Each structure stands twice: as structure tokens, then as C-alpha cells.
Image (tube, rainbow, N blue to C red):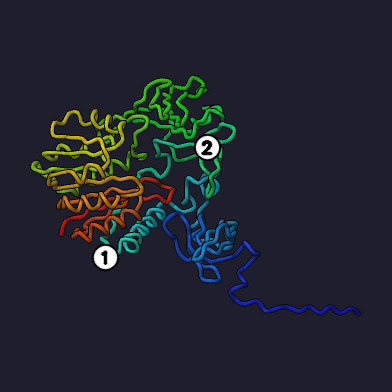
Amino acid sequence: MLVLLVITKRIPEKAKTMVSETQIAVTMDEMVFGGSAMGRLPDGRALFVPYALAGERVLVEIAEEKAHHAFGKLLSVLQPSPQRIAARCPHFGECGGCHYQHLPYPEQVNLKAKLLVEQFQRIGGFDEVPPVEIYPSPAAWHYRNSLQFHLTPEGKLGFQRAQSQETLAIEQCFLPVEPLMDLWKQIELDPTSGVERAVLRCDSVGNLLLVLESQNPQPPEVLIEELPISVVHLSPAGSLVIAGSEHLWMEVKGQWLRLSAEAFFQVNLAVAEQIVTFLLNHLTLSSHDTLLEVYCGGGLYSSFLAPKVKRLIGIESSPSACRDFEVNLDAFDQVELYEATAEQVLPALKLQPQTILLDPPRSGLSKTVRQAIGQLAPPQIAYISCDPATLARDARAFAQCGYRLEHLAFFDMFPQTYHIECVALMHKA
């Protein structure tokens, strides 16, 4: 008789979760800002996993390791959360555009509001945060009036892959407004054209615009199959209209605003209207006031606030946005515009504004801008932000100058994604 003796080595409890050197089964503890869930590795380091949910047991491949944390790629869900639903889009998890399609929309909204408060507590150092006013998007799908694409090696329009610099050719997307649905499939570009980015936009009356961006001043050849669409090429040489018009027209609360090809505009018009209404209802304005709007863009908010004040001053560095501002605010005699950076203008201003409205880029305010606003010392600051981390940082600086956080509102400008649009109202204590 052949007897086989098998000697087993006792595996420490913590190590039992290991599947291989790069794979691990782990329980996710909580959701964090940025679209990931966070769990703990056996050595105690935080592990961030996109597309996982809090409470789930998941199989993860370690993608990147740091001294105090690591990033993982979700391989499979071993024990799903009761909240998990099937994603609507077949590209979800591969395309980097969406982060929360596996959560019901009401849960997405609640999660974002919770994460907004956490950012103010953790980064802003606020012990007390006022109750967040929550404004869900009227449409959870088909809300985007603008889509940004990159080119695949074959010249097809696509989105950036999740956790990658590669471009994924897209067959379906449920975020754009109806006129943009499937439009990109009808557009062909030479992969050697030098086009680095393509943007599709739709205005309030259905006019379509394709913006092609490259470093080559020579415009690319575009096959648009006789589509009723305008085409504009942007390069260091400037803006060149290839077909149609370089302007679109957006309607917000019954008011028409011109939008140039290279200018920024909110991608969710219904939520943009919510923000305008919030400002009109919550800002204390009078016919004797001076209002200073920094990063005013094409004048979306100025158009509604100008009638409420004696003097409105806009600051904007984008030449195209300034041209739009001049058109959109042409009816008001009490409006002025500085075409320069906030860092150039604010320290030189000699006035006492009653209100400063801020709508900076994702990076938030520079130290120069924060200090200049502190010197101007307006009784009221309204800060519109697309990044709660930089907003919390800047709000902390204003709090140190004697400002009190009175209102904090979350507007879901970007359903299905982790991005958070919010407004903070602060008053001089």
C-alpha cells in the first residue's frame, strides 16, 4: 500500500485573502471621492478600487502600489452589495467616462452629497457643515450638450479607457442629448491629420457643431457625409470655420446666450438653470451694490445678476469667452469687463464690492487670488465649483479671514459620474 503524507503549513488569518502575488480578495469598507471604494490590504494600507461598492467582497488585481496605499483593478464581485444594479452601457468599466452606473440614481445623489461634506470636514477642516441642499439632475441620462473625444489609431472617435491613456472606440453612450446620439459614428477623420481632440456640441435649437483641436495650423480634411453640422478648427493660429458657423445659442431660463466654439459652457442646461435660480434666491443683492464676477466666462450668471445690481464687473482671460460676454451683456450699461487673469486684475482693484461670485476651473483659486479677495473683503462670497476638494481648501482660507459658511448646495451636473458641482455661500462674520 502506497501512503502519501501531505504536510500543510498553517496560513496566517490575514494572509488567507491572498489569491496570487497580484490578486487579492478584500472587503470594501467605504466609498471615497473619485469614484472608488476603499478597503484595506493585509498590511493595513488603503486599497482603492474603481467600480466596487462599500460592503462588497471583491477579487482585485493590484495595479499600482505606493508606500501607504495601493490601487486595484476589479476582477469580479464575490459578494455584491444589495445596492448594485446592472450597468446600462456595455462599455461601463472599460470606458473611463462613467463611474456610478452600477448604483441607482437616487443612491448616486446621496453618495455625492455625503462625499461633499466629507471633503469640507477632511480638507477644509470644518467641524460643522450646514445641511447640504441637494438638487438632482432632472434627467439622469441624455443630459450632456457636449461630448469630448480623442482619436483611436484608426481615426475613430472614442473616449479614454478607464485607468489608461488609450482611446476606446465607442459604439454606445447614454449621456448625450438626443441630437448627438450616434453622431460621432458618421464622422471620419484621417488618423494622420494631427487632430488631438474633437468636441461635439448641440445648442438649444438643435444646431450641431464639431470642434477639431490640433497644433497644426493646416485644417484637416473631414468627411461628415453631408451632415447638417458646423465644423471649426482650433489651432495656435486661431479659430478657422471649415463649415457653417462658429457660434451656438443656448437658452437658459428664457434667455439666449451666444457660445463660441472654443468657449466653456455648462454641459447640463437644466442643472445650469437650477444654479441660476439658487443664486437669485440666496444672494442678497440691491440696486446700490457692486458685484464682481471672477472667471465670468461668456456671462451665464452675469446675464441674470446684472439687473439686480448697480454695477457688475466681470473678469475673464479667455478672448473668445470675452467676446461672447460682450454680446450676451450688451443690453446693460452698468456692466464692465476685464480681459485678463484674476491674478492680474484683483490685486489692482480699488473698490468695495458687496458680492464676489467665483466660478474657477477645477484647480480652484491661486494663493494670489485668495489673498486679493481677502483684501477686498466683500460681505458676501458665492463660490461655484466642480471640485469639492479645491473648494474646501479655498473655503478654509476664507474662514481664516473671518467668513462663515452659510449655505452649501450640491447640483448633480454630471449623473453617472463621480464629478460634483456645488455652490458655497460665505458671509463675513
**Residue drawn where x is 43% and y is 30% of the image:** 179
Q: Is residue 198 left or right of residue 117?
A: right
- Kindly indicate the quadrant of the structure image that contains residue 343: top left
Q: Quadrant of the N terminus?
A: bottom right
* Residue topped by disc 2: 158
Secondary element under disc 1, as helix, strand or loop, is: loop
- Residue 135 seen anywhere in this rendered image of the structure: no
Q: Amino acid at mark 2?
A: Gly
Q: Which mark is residue 128?
A: 1
Identify which amino acid the numbered label 1 is placed on. Answer: Glu
Residue 202's tag is none
Q: Is residue 199 visible from the viewing direction of this image?
A: yes
Alpha carbons under labels 2 and 1: distance apart: 43 Å
Residue drawn at x 62%, y 61% is 22
Q: Quadrant of residue 59?
A: bottom right
| N-term-proximal mark, 2 vs 1 | 1
